[in-house]
């Protein structure tokens, strides 16, 4: 059992938790993920590591309530226990030798982008951040990004905060203005990463994307997380989750990600009903 | 006592096919006491014990059968337990027809003695009537780490614990058992039986740490260094599933057998109270002809499929699954499409509406007919495509059961551990010793996909080699 040490709601849909898992914290690096089960009979879900404290032995996760399992997880509080928490899994984000990087985060993906930005900043790399949200209510981690980015642009779809528009807008402007990035790192919804790649490819700016497909074991056994990268089948759990954005087949990944949509919607509404009943 | 000269085995009582095809309860129900004693009487007690030579873990077969004849079932259990850590499992899933029973003298002029069925009877009898846990042996002070709580790891841990070693098993998943819990379905091996066998190991003093991925959470070097283990056994099991490389394998409804079975078995997706989804498909094609393919096909039936096909490119004769499994599958209504090879998986695509939720779901599998050509250097006749013999089978799910390649995680993070071209860890066959001192390996991590009992045999071999290594130090 793994104790939740700290919990904070970052907005109405996004929750941050620190979970006691000293073995995971000891080895965790930015870009890696964990798999957890909330309780017995729960499903195994992957969540990318949003931070870790080796002294305290805790691992930070930040998640958005999107389905039945994240709904159940959101009802857990500090002092409660999770039944399983395993990691760190996947290959850490490659940072060696980078001098100037643009980090593009979208929505809850910003939670995963942050530790990478912090590591790059600590290494002395020049970090430009572009973080995008649907609206001001959904904004997260702005101060944390400001602290580790040499430049930060906040975008909202509706213009309720920062600049209005999508993240690719300032990205393209920066590239056109002659910013010579060693790498662009995009972490967010698949559709955002697809368009980031479409933006950088004409300029041949190397772009790394962090993929988060459906997984079960997360250790290279089930093959559920397979993606087509450069025409080859790759497994996000052991070969990724970071891949060369120019080579990823995003359309296929988006289609595969929707396989359980019907089931998920049903399970989500059932779980919500369950919690409503408990309240009554 | 005169031997029972009936040329046939006592039949195994089973759920009728039309009933069992719709539930997840165990298919074979096990011998009664009378049937077991009657079957035991068929054993001639040959002095040269040919059966034992066919057993990868060398169970003293005639001795345990003698105890059954005498009605001393616990005595029989104790004899099996000397050689096997998982008798209730092996009695169910071992391919006895290619092992002990293949060498049985009674098999020359009839059916061999039902050794597997007797083993199962004895183990079940013990599990039902004997509550007393085995005695925890006196510790010899040596610490050994075992990676993976599957058949190889459990067998290795059991043998070492009995010799007094302090054994810790590290398991990546949330539950011990490996393929016994994620792969083999409930209807063939109830999970409560695996749990009992694991409890027996715990009673012997074996510690099991779940949710630890060796190579990620902890490395092999750390186990041997700061964590103070003197030897390590790697039984990390099968790895990444293979796909055919044909168009359409990324469509929604294409599963690897590992994924499909893990969802249903380990994650219990067949039960209402599980939160793990699985597609409830109407028509399913399973590609491959091994035991895993049969397990996947029979699982699909039980999840409610109306029609399930096994698609296999060779003929019935070459079908690698156990005869009994094929027979069970066919009785339950699985249709075999033999000498058939898939060339493409077809999916739904609405050109008018890119957002049609049906887009990307499997609609069929295109196949070609095959014939067997000349035998290759290994004597296997390779299948050759018959020109222009394409046909399409309408299905909404395709399950690929064409094997796996060994798990890459430990190899990636352990310098000095050598693997062969196929990714299997290189070991000395007689000891299981790897290229790293104090590190041993066995099971699918070495051989690629094989059987439970071969993995157990490898675990036992390594356990005795580890014992010799540590006693010599």
Image (cartoon, coloured by chain):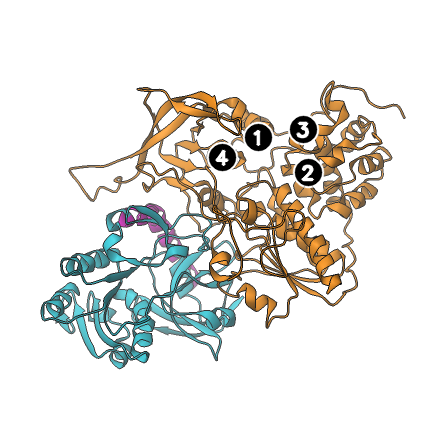
Chain colours: A cyan, B orange
Q: Quadrant of the N terminus of chain B?
A: top right
Q: Is residue B125 left or right of residue A124?
A: right
In percent of width and height, residue A98 lies at 28, 72
Chain that bears disc 2: B
Residue B301's spot in the image, x, y percent? 47, 32
Over which residues does the magenta segment extend? A253-280
Q: Are marks 1 and 2 in contact (CB under 8 Å)?
A: no
Q: Nearer the viewer, mark 3 or mark 1?
A: 1
Pointer 4: residues within 10 angstroms few (<14), some, or many (20+)? Answer: many
Helix, strand or loop at mark 2: helix
Q: Is residue A4 visible?
A: no
Vertical comparison of B271 with A245: above or below: above
Task: Give the image quarter of residue A10.
Answer: bottom left
Callouts 1 and 2 on one subunit: yes
The mark found on residue B293 in the picture is 4
Q: Position of residue B58 (x, y in %)?
A: 74, 41
């Amino acid at each position: 059992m793994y104790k939740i040490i700290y919990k904070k709601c970052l907005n109405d849909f996004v929750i941050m938790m620190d979970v006691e898992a000293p073995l995971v914290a000891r080895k965790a690096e930015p870009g890696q993920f964990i798999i957890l089960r909330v309780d017995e009979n729960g499903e195994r879900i992957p969540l990318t590591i949003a931070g870790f404290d080796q002294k305290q032995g805790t691992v930070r996760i930040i998640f958005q309530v999107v389905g039945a399992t994240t709904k159940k997880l959101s009802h857990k509080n500090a002092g409660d226990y999770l039944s399983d928490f395993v990691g760190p899994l996947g290959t850490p984000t490659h940072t060696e030798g980078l001098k100037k990087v643009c980090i593009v985060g979208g929505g809850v993906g910003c939670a995963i982008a942050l530790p990478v930005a912090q590591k790059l900043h600590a290494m002395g790399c020049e970090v430009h951040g572009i973080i995008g949200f649907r609206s001001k209510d959904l904004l997260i981690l702005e101060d944390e990004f400001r602290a580790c980015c040499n430049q930060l642009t906040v975008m909202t779809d509706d213009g309720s905060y920062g600049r209005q528009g999508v993240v690719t807008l300032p990205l393209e402007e920066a590239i056109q203005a002659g910013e010579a990035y060693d790498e662009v790192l995009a972490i967010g919804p698949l559709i955002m990463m697809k368009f980031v790649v479409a933006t950088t490819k004409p300029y041949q700016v190397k772009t790394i994307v962090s993929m988060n497909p459906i997984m079960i074991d997360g250790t290279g056994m089930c093959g559920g997380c397979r993606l087509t990268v450069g025409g080859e089948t790759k497994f996000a759990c052991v070969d990724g989750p970071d891949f060369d954005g120019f080579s990823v087949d995003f359309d296929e990944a988006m289609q595969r990600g929707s396989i359980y949509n019907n089931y998920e919607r049903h399970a989500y509404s059932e779980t919500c009903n369950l919690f409503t009943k408990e309240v009554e | 006592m005169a031997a029972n000269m009936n040329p046939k085995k006592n039949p195994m009582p089973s759920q009728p096919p039309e009933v069992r095809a719709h539930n997840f309860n165990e298919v074979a129900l096990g011998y009664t006491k009378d049937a077991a004693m009657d079957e035991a009487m068929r054993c001639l007690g040959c002095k040269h014990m040919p059966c034992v030579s066919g057993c990868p873990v060398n169970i003293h077969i005639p001795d345990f059968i003698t105890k059954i004849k005498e009605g001393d079932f616990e005595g029989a259990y104790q004899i099996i337990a000397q050689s096997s850590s998982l008798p209730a499992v092996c009695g169910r899933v071992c391919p006895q027809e290619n092992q002990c029973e293949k060498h049985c003298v009674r098999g020359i002029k009839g059916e061999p003695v039902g050794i597997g069925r007797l083993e199962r009877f004895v183990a079940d009898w013990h599990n039902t009537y004997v509550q007393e846990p085995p005695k925890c042996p006196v510790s010899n002070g040596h610490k050994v780490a075992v990676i993976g709580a599957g058949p190889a790891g459990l067998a290795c841990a059991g043998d070492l614990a009995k010799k007094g070693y302090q054994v810790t098993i590290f398991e990546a998943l949330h539950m011990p058992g490996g393929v016994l819990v994620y792969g083999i379905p409930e209807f063939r091996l109830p999970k409560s039986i695996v749990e009992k066998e694991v409890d027996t190991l715990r009673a012997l003093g074996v510690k099991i740490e779940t949710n630890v991925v060796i190579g990620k959470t902890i490395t092999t070097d750390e186990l041997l260094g700061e964590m103070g283990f003197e030897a390590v056994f790697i039984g990390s099991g099968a790895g990444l599933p293979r796909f055919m490389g044909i168009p359409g394998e990324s469509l929604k409804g294409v599963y690897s057998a590992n994924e499909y079975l893990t969802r249903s078995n380990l994650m219990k997706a067949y039960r209402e109270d599980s939160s793990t989804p699985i597609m409830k498909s109407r028509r399913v094609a399973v590609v491959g002809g091994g035991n895993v393919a049969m397990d996947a096909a029979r699982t699909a039936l039980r999840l409610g499929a109306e029609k399930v096909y096994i698609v296999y490119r060779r003929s019935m004769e070459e079908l690698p699954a156990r005869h009994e499994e094929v027979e069970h599958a066919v009785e339950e209504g699985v249709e075999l499409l033999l000498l058939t090879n898939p060339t493409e998986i077809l999916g739904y695509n609405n050109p008018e509406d890119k957002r049609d939720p049906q887009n990307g779901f499997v609609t069929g599998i295109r196949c070609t007919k095959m014939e067997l050509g000349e035998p290759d250097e290994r004597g296997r006749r390779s299948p050759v495509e018959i020109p222009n013999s394409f046909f399409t089978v309408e299905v909404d799910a395709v399950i690929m059961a064409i094997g796996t390649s060994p798990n890459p995680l430990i190899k990636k993070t352990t310098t000095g551990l050598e693997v062969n071209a196929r990714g299997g860890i290189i070991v000395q066959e007689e000891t299981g010793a790897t290229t790293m001192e104090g590190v041993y390996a066995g099971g699918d991590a070495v051989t690629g996909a094989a059987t439970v009992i071969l993995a157990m045999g490898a675990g036992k071999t390594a356990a005795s080699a580890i014992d010799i290594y540590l006693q010599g130090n």
